Image (cartoon, grey):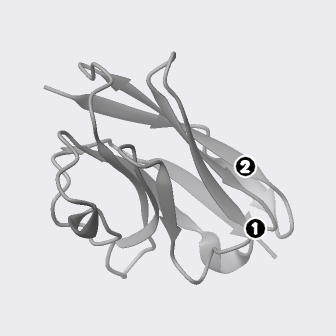
Amino acid sequence: QVQVMESGGGSVQAGGSLRLSCAASGYTGSSACMGWFRQAPGKEREGVARMYTIDGSSRYADSVKGRFTISRDNAKNALYLQMNSLKPEDTGMYYCAYRVPAGSWWTCGLGVNGYNAWGQGTQVTVSS
């Protein structure tokens, strides 16, 4: 069973950068749908970025396109989210999620449903 754990959150000023990491255990490198999500206080959890390992494709929420980059390190069983040009509205708890096996590409999306392993989250706070 895959378990994931996030790290790398913190407090930064607007315009700054952070890199979030997600360590996966129990993951043998098979196909997966991997995603990053966030949840601000009083709001629903929303998808930020996802990666489909079968074809290596990535997808981003419109609000983060051009600023965030999702990547992975196969050797380390790690998933990353590089966040640049951070804005106060990026503040929230960030979660890593995996779905193993990956399933069909059209089901590997930014919706919270369909992922079967979630981390506890790491807090990101962006001040103006």
Q: Which mark is residue 24?
A: none
Question: Pointer 2: what residue?
Answer: 18
Above-or-below relation of 10 to 21? below
Image quarter for residue 21? Answer: top right
Q: Secondary structure at mark 2?
A: strand
What amino acid does circle 2 point to?
Answer: Leu
Q: Residues within 10 Å of mark 2 (few under 14, many from 20)?
A: some
Q: Which mark is residue 86?
A: 1
Q: Quarter of the image for the C terminus: give it.
A: bottom right
Query: Do residues under tags 1 and 2 come within 8 Å of each other at their CB atoms?
Result: yes
Q: Position of residue 72 (x, y in %)?
A: 54, 36
Going by the numbered disc 1, the residue's amino acid type is Leu
Left or right of 110? Residue 87 is right
Q: Residue at x 39, y 43 (%)?
A: 53
* Residue at figure coordinates x 57%, y 83% from the top left: 62
Give the vertical position of 59 relative to 115 (above or below): below
Residue 112, x across and y down, in percent = 25, 67
Left or right: residue 87 compared with residue 50: right
Q: Please give the name of the residue rendered at 28% of the width and 37% of the height, measured from the top-left corner.
A: 31
> Does residue 62 lie above or below 25 as drawn?
below
State the CA–CA distance, disc 1 to disc 2. 8 Å
Side of 39 where 59 appears, left or right: right
Mark closer to the chain start, 1 or 2: 2
In the picture as drawn, the residue positioned furthest to the front comes out as 55
